[in-house]
């Protein structure tokens, strides 16, 4: 969507209108059969919801067998070339200091840069790593592509605001398990569970710092994995806490069964959508001047909130009132 100057997104968000518009779920797969199934599922659910409700990230870092990195990169490129124009597919390459990094970037972008929506770079420690990844993008016709980065160590967390400020970075993700492991046993394994990760102070601090850095720079904070993939209730509870308490607007999925719980947890409820639609339609009639709604004042500050709520409703496939559908054509 490319909003006109009179569109609420442009009026209320200005230059930031497109910065945070990403599906709320990022689904990872690295084995060939699962990658193919993920791409098929994305197309199937896009038809069901009327919009693309999750990204598919094809994984080289964990998906490529040791010694088979080159073959895996060619496989990922081949899968990308087979995707449709409406697909949203990314790739997670190896870290910039890994011998296979340049090979991943040259092969995948060299063969299918036009099919990618972004490149995920793991184990980013500083802006220097972002600059190295950006050079590889530019070398391979990736000028239009944003970078998503993984924050996975105490050192990276220390520099997270600087990393988030780089204009090529669109989203930051938290790498929970690597972050815990980087503390040399000082954080217990329970902090990697669906509940414990919201309780240990060092992990909680990391999540809040990453979310804060993203929001300070107009970027998208993406929440870490939940490894108990067979427990849908635990998945949805974790996603809801990530969204409602920690400020995350996107979350990783590592199994197809996690996608719908993430969508449900990240979506606004029907009453929230109805309120937002009513207030924004009244604001439009008032040419975006302040209004009185049920004896409560609303102006552009609250209009921005309600617009972003409607955007999240659309991104999660929630039905929107007829009066606002024209904004999402």
Image (tube, helix red, strand yellow):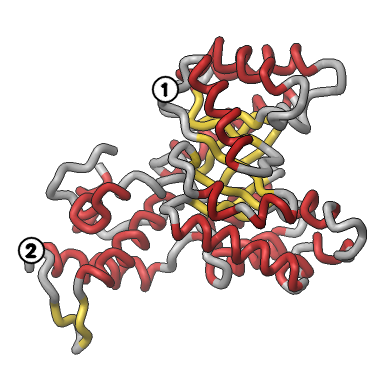
What SS does tag 2 mark?
Answer: loop
User: Which residue appears at 20% of the width and 48% of the height?
Assistant: 326
Q: Which mark is residue 85?
A: 1
Residue closer to the observer: 97 or 214? 97
Q: Pinpoint residue 106: horizontal percent, then vertical percent.
A: 61, 14
Give the quarter of the figure containing the N terminus: top left
Q: Which mark is residue 60?
A: none
In-image side of 282 versus 22 (left or right): left
Q: Pinpoint residue 222: horizontal percent, then vertical percent.
A: 57, 52
Give the quarter of the figure containing the C terminus: top left
User: Which residue appears at 78% of the width and 69% of the height?
Assistant: 196
Q: Residue furthest front?
A: 128
- Disc 2 versus disc 1: nearer the observer: 2
The reply to whether residue 191 is visible in this rendering is yes
Q: Of label 2 and label 1, which has the lower sequence position?
A: 1
Q: Residue furthest right?
A: 185
Q: Residue furthest bottom?
A: 295
In-image side of 20 versus 280 (left or right): right
Q: Which mark is residue 287?
A: 2
Residue 206: quarter of image: bottom right
What SS does tag 1 mark?
Answer: loop
């Amino acid at each position: 969507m490319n909003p006109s100057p009179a569109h609420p997104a442009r009026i209320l968000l200005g230059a930031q209108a497109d910065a945070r518009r990403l599906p709320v779920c990022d689904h990872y797969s690295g084995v060939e059969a699962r990658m193919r199934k993920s791409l098929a599922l994305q197309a199937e659910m896009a038809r069901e919801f009327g919009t693309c409700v999750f990204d598919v990230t094809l994984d080289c870092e964990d998906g490529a067998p040791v010694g088979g990195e080159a073959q895996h990169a060619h496989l990922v490129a081949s899968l990308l070339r087979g995707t449709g124009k409406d697909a949203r597919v990314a790739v997670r390459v190896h870290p910039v200091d890994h011998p296979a990094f340049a090979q991943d970037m040259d092969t995948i972008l060299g063969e299918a840069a036009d099919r990618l929506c972004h490149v995920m770079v793991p184990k980013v420690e500083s802006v220097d790593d972002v600059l190295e990844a950006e050079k590889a993008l530019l070398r391979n016709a990736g000028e239009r592509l944003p970078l998503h980065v993984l924050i996975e160590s105490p050192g990276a967390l220390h520099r997270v605001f600087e990393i988030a400020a780089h204009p090529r970075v669109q989203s930051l993700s938290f790498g929970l398990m690597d972050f815990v492991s980087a503390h040399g046993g000082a954080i217990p394994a329970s902090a990697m569970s669906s509940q414990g990760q919201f309780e240990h102070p060092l992990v909680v601090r990391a999540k809040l710092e990453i979310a804060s850095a993203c929001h300070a720079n107009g970027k998208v904070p993406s929440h870490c994995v939940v490894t108990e993939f067979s427990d849908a209730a635990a998945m949805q509870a974790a996603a809801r806490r990530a969204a409602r308490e920690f400020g995350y607007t996107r979350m990783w999925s590592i199994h197809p069964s996690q996608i719908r719980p993430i969508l449900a947890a990240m979506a606004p409820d029907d009453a929230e959508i109805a309120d937002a639609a009513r207030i924004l339609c009244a604001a439009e009639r008032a040419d975006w001047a302040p209004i009185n709604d049920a004896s409560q004042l609303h102006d552009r500050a609250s209009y921005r909130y309600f617009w972003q709520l409607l955007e999240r409703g659309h991104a999660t496939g929630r039905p929107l009132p007829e009066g606002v559908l024209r904004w999402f054509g």
